[in-house]
């Protein structure tokens, strides 16, 4: 004990400037608060996290088991095993029509590491990253870690939260290094139509200093036609990075396999970064990802149909309350309703609802429903509902939200 204390006293740990602003994400904080309430015996429904409730398909689990038994247990190549990179280009060709070489693919520990590799490999302090807002919370933390500057580009519910070309054109400066495009999007569910992507590409054509990171991790959870940014803008191929993975489509969030497809020079630089951080992604998970991509694909359609029903149910239930409003989003498994009409109301216990965060706190503490306030995504006045939960949980959760809203005065 004494020895430990004296070590602590001499420890001169201080956070680096590039990580000083990093905090536990609001999504994690809310899910921890929900768990603490559950542990104390409260009945809490949590709609906070972004992971499908379906199991990983059985044949994928079998493939991982076989890989472990057959000795695929050595360091894999940093860029990813050939057989997986070949499966990725084949799948990409089949689903988007775009042709790439396995050498243009990097496999990482989830899509998140692909994004972080790309920014570590290319951002200098002060470089701008243009981010349509609302955005997935990790984007801002990854950019901060790389000492980049996040420039939010506001999107609006009336445009289905899609970035407008004039907003993009006005925002680009000489310091702009990247534009993030996330379709289908988290947290809004925005699905960019082909025409919108083409209009954005026309703006980008005039600005060769801007690279494009198209995060298409929710590709297979699209209720209308999905268009890969790369398929409509082949002339921007030498500065486009596509990000995708197995986490969402195949319910494989814990296997940590994502990939990037981009120009060879970019992929080599990202591979060098990954080589010094984590080396190649787990060999067993890579074997599982091959099975996911090469195995039966009909599960994607049946899970999509299930998600669509849940989306329609949640949207109808929320719109049936007098004060919450949302449109059915085009993709992913989130809705981002506005709660601006709730702000300014008072709870039955006499507490004022002054913000989206207050509303979410009220729902959690008084009604046992955990949701993420829009401010976490740069969208104050909104809240995010993940509907990757069972129909029974969604039915009960929506009933509680409806009662909570009705009790406000
Ligand atoms: N991109 C977006 C938009 C996400 O919502 C997520 C996960 O929530 C990811 C990337 C990360 O995916 P992975 O779990 O493969 O790292």
Image (cartoon, helix red, strand yellow):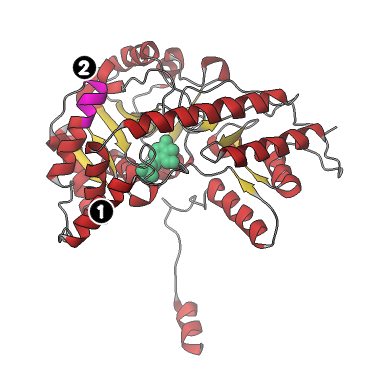
Q: Is residue 201 left or right of residue 106?
A: right
- Residue 146 can be seen, yes or no: no
**Label annotation for residue 210:** none
Does the magenta stretch mainly form a helix, a strand or a loop? helix
Question: Residue at position x 43%, y 52% from top?
Answer: 19
**Label annotation for residue 235:** 2
Residue in the foreground of this view, choosing between 195 and 317 = 317
Q: Indicate the quadrant of ligand 1 in the picture.
A: top left
Q: In this view, does 409 lie to the left or right of 361?
A: right
- Tell me where residue 88 appears, x and y as whole percent: 21, 35
Whether 60 is drawn above or below 218: the answer is below
Local secondary structure at mark 1: helix
- Image: magenta residue range: 91-97
Question: Residue at position x 51%, y 89% from top?
Answer: 2
Q: Say which quarter of the image contains residue 102.
A: top left
Q: Does the magenta stretch include residue 95?
A: yes
- Tell me where residue 37 appears, x and y as whole percent: 67, 57
Q: Which residue lies furthest to the bottom in this view?
A: 2
- Residue 184 can be seen, yes or no: yes
Mark closer to the chain start, 2 or 1: 1
Whether 28 is drawn above or below 125: the answer is below
Q: Say which quarter of the image contains residue 41.
A: bottom right
- The crowd level at tag 1 (other Cα within 10 Å; few <14, some 14-19, many 20+) is many
Q: Is residue 162 left or right of residue 301?
A: right
Q: Name the residue under label 1.
A: 64
Residue in the foreground of this view, choosing between 395 and 339 = 395
């Amino acid at each position: 004990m004494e020895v430990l204390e004296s070590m602590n006293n001499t420890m001169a740990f201080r956070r680096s400037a590039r990580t000083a602003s990093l905090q536990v994400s609001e999504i994690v904080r809310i899910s921890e608060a929900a768990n603490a309430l559950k542990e104390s015996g409260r009945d809490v429904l949590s709609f906070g996290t972004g992971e499908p409730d379906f199991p990983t398909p059985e044949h994928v689990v079998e493939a991982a088991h076989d890989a472990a038994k057959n000795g695929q247990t050595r360091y894999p190549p940093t860029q990813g095993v050939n057989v997986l990179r070949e499966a990725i280009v084949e799948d990409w060709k089949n689903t988007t029509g775009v042709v790439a070489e396995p050498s243009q693919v990097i496999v990482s520990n989830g899509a998140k590491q692909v994004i972080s590799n790309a920014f570590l490999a290319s951002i200098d302090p002060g470089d701008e990253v243009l981010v349509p807002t609302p955005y997935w919370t990790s984007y801002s933390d990854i950019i901060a870690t790389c000492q980049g500057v996040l420039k939010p580009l506001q999107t609006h519910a009336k445009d289905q939260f899609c970035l407008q070309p004039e907003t993009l054109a006005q925002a680009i400066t000489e310091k702009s290094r990247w534009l993030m495009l996330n379709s289908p999007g988290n947290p809004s569910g925005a699905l960019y139509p082909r025409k919108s992507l083409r209009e954005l590409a026309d703006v980008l054509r005039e600005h060769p200093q801007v690279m494009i990171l198209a995060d298409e991790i929710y590709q297979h959870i699209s209720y209308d036609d999905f268009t890969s940014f790369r398929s409509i803008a082949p002339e921007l191929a030498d500065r486009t990075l596509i990000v995708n993975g197995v986490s969402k489509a195949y319910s494989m969030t814990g296997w940590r396999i994502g990939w990037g497809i981009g120009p060879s020079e970019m992929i080599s630089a990202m591979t060098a970064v990954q080589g010094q951080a984590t080396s190649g992604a787990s060999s067993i998970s890579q074997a599982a990802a091959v099975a996911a991509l090469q195995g039966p694909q009909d599960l994607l359609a049946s899970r999509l149909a299930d998600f669509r029903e849940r989306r329609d149910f949640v949207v109808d239930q929320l719109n049936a309350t007098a004060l919450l409003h949302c449109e059915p989003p085009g993709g992913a498994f989130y809705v981002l309703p506005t709660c601006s009409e709730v702000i300014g109301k008072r709870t039955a216990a006499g507490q004022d609802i002054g913000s989206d965060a207050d509303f979410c706190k009220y729902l959690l503490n008084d009604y046992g429903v955990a949701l993420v306030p829009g401010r976490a995504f740069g969208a104050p006045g909104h809240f995010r509902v993940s509907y990757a939960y069972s129909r029974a949980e969604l039915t009960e959760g929506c009933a509680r939200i409806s009662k909570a809203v009705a009790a406000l005065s």
